[in-house]
């Protein structure tokens, strides 16, 4: 999967605030993503993020 820092990803499951869009802040073994609905930052394992991605919009 070709994901870069700054990309906007739409997840299959919504964040508790109701937002589904997240900005990618850091990539590695874990992903650091920021919810675009409430600006909360979350770190999740790469496998969980890649499994739950619905679509990717490039940030650049």
Image (cartoon, grey):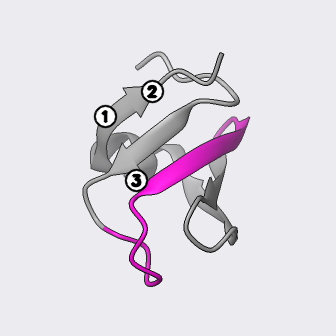
Q: Residue at x 45, y 40 (%)?
A: 9
Q: Label 2: few (<14), some or many (≥20) within 10 Å?
A: few
Instruction: Give yes or no for contact between labels 3 and 1 (Cβ–Cβ under 8 Å).
Output: no
Earlier residue among tags 3 and 1: 3
Query: Could you give the CA–CA distance between mark 2 and mark 3, rounded to whole angstroms?
Result: 19 Å
Q: Is residue 26 magenta?
A: yes
Q: Quadrant of residue 43?
A: bottom right
Secondary element type, mark 2: strand
Where is residue 15? Give x, y as percent. 43, 73
Q: Is 14 left, or right, of 37 in this rendering?
A: left
Instruction: Give yes or no for contact between labels 1 and 2 (Cβ–Cβ under 8 Å).
Output: yes
Q: Label 1: few (<14), some or many (≥20) within 10 Å?
A: few
Secondary element type, mark 1: strand
Where is residue 10? Give x, y as percent. 37, 46
Looking at the image, can residue 30 be seen? no
Q: Residue at x 40, y 29 (%)?
A: 56
Q: Is residue 13 magenta?
A: no
Q: Residue at x 40, y 20 (%)?
A: 1
Query: Could you give the CA–CA distance between mark 3 and mark 1, rounded to whole angstroms?
Result: 15 Å
Q: Residue at x 25, y 56 (%)?
A: 12
Camera-near label (3 vs 1) is 1
Secondary element type, mark 3: helix
Residue ranking furthest to the bottom:
16
Q: Label 3: few (<14), some or many (≥20) within 10 Å?
A: few
- 29 lies above or below 35: above
Between 49 and 29, the one nearer to me in the picture: 49
Please state the extent of the stretch shown in magenta in the rendering. Answer: 14-30
* Residue at mark 3: 48
Earlier residue among tags 2 and 3: 3
Where is residue 28? Give x, y as percent. 69, 35
* Residue at mark 2: 57
* Residue at mark 1: 55
């Amino acid at each position: 999967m070709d994901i870069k820092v700054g990309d906007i990803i739409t997840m299959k499951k919504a964040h508790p605030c109701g937002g589904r869009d997240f900005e990618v802040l850091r990539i590695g073994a874990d992903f650091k993503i920021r919810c675009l609905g409430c600006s909360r930052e979350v770190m999740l394992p790469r496998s969980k993020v890649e499994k739950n991605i619905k679509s990717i919009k490039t940030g650049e």
